[in-house]
Each structure stands twice: as structure tokens, then as C-alpha cells.
Amino acid sequence: MFAGASLDENSGAFCELKANFFRLILTKAELLALTPADFDFEAETVRINKSYQRLKGEDVITSPKTRKGNRTIKMPKFLCEEMQDCLKMYYDLKDCDRLFPVSKHYLFSEMDRGCKAMGVKRIRIHDLRHSHVSLLIDMGFTALAIGNRVGHEAEKITYRYAHLFPSVQTEMANRLDMERDAKGGGNDVRESNGQTGALEK
């Protein structure tokens, strides 16, 4: 495992790194199953193809629950750099070793500790995932694109976050109005109706 790891699991850098991975919309089980072999820094991607569970006192790695759960996610450049710096701080780290050798309970405790330190209301770890989906919706990405990133079908994203999409729908309607006005669509329709009426007479 992580023999002689020099990166303190309670350090700010380690906690921030885990928080950044949650922004990739990983689940807790996906995060805790990550290994160095999952990263392709040239392509700036991370492969999600397994899930971590603690069963009967033993660590168990399983496949994702659904077909959509198997996916490759494009990482922002800052996270690629953070991840490479993190890997340099370990020695004797094998490609198959878990990158975050902690439990889900540890993550819950760290979230509580962080919220108390910041003086903010306690939130669940999964809320970070919801926040990121909401951010992507606000940035204008489609349910299909977000679903591919999060590992869900587009229909599930649309249903769960339907209340956040109206602003996008309004922008769509406004742009359709602008497109119609720019091409004189209204006049074309009226002229067409007038011609039809003349023919009918």
C-alpha cells in the first residue's frame, strides 16, 4: 500500500485534492477506488471503472452499478497538475494501489470538521456532486453532456434537476426570437398568408 507516504491525510492539500475530485462528479465509492493507473495526464483524463466498498471488515472493489458508470472524464488542467504533484509525494506507490486509502466514515468526519472550521451549515458529501451538476447546468451544458460526465442517463438528470433548466429554456426561446427577427421570419409568414389568400380568391 502506501508505505512511507509523505502526504498527511489530514493536511489541507490532501483534503483540497479530494474536494476537487468531487467536483468531477465522482461518487464517494468511485473516489475511494481510484488508482494511479486510472490517470492519463497526456490526455488529461481519469478513468472511472470501479467502486470501493467496505464489507465485513474488508476492502472490496467492484464494478460500477450501471453501464453508464463506466466512463472517462476530462480533467481541468489545474487538477491534472495537482494530481501529478500528489503522486510525486508518495514513494513505493504501485499502479494498482488505492490513491485515497481511507474509509467513507473518514470522509464524513472530514466534511463535518471542515464545515465547523468554516462556520457554515453542515452539508453532505453528496451535496458537492449536486452543486457541480447545478453549476454545469447554469453554464449551459446539456443534460446529455452532464449525464455522460456524472454516469447517469440524460433523462435522470433532466428529471432530478428540472427546476434548474427553465433559465436555459428561456435563453433558448429568446435566441429563437432573435433568429426569427434577424431573418425577417414574421414578415415572411404574413406575406405567405397574404399570397395564399390571394390565390384562394
Image (cartoon, helix red, strand yellow):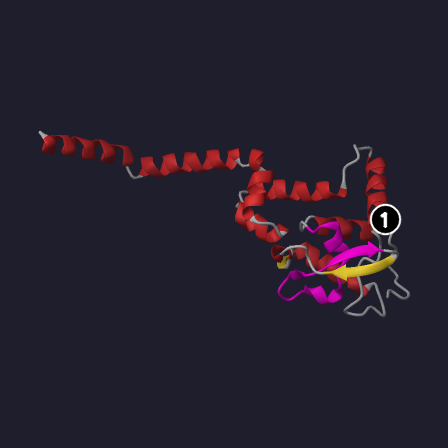
Q: Nearer the viewer, residue 2 or 139?
A: 2
Quarter of the image where one finds residue 78:
bottom right
Quarter of the image where one finds residue 131:
top right
Q: Is residue 35 visible?
A: yes
Identify the magenta region: 26-55
Residue 1: percent from left, percent from top = 86, 66
Residue 37: percent from left, percent from top = 72, 67
Residue 27: percent from left, percent from top = 71, 50
The vertical placement of 40 against 187, above or below, is below
Quadrant location of the C terminus?
top left
Q: Three-letter amino acid code at disc 1?
A: Tyr
The mark total stands at: 1
- The crowd level at tag 1 (other Cα within 10 Å; few <14, some 14-19, many 20+) is few
User: What's the residue at 14%, 30% (across, down)?
Assistant: 197
- In the rendered structure, the answer to whether residue 51 lies left or right of residue 73 reads right
Q: Nearer the viewer, residue 173 or 199?
A: 199
Question: Magenta includes 141?
Answer: no
Quarter of the image where one finds residue 120:
top right
User: What's the residue at 57%, 49% (across, down)?
Assistant: 153
Q: Is residue 138 visible?
A: no
The residue where tag 1 is placed is 106
User: What's the residue at 55%, 41% (across, down)?
Assistant: 158
Q: In the current view of this chain or complex, which residue is farthest to the right?
A: 4
Residue 75: percent from left, percent from top = 65, 56
Question: Magenta includes 28?
Answer: yes
The vertical placement of 141 against 58, above or below, is above
Q: Nearer the viewer, residue 172 or 83?
A: 172
User: What's the residue at 64%, 67% (across, down)?
Assistant: 42
The vertical placement of 68 against 158, above or below, is below
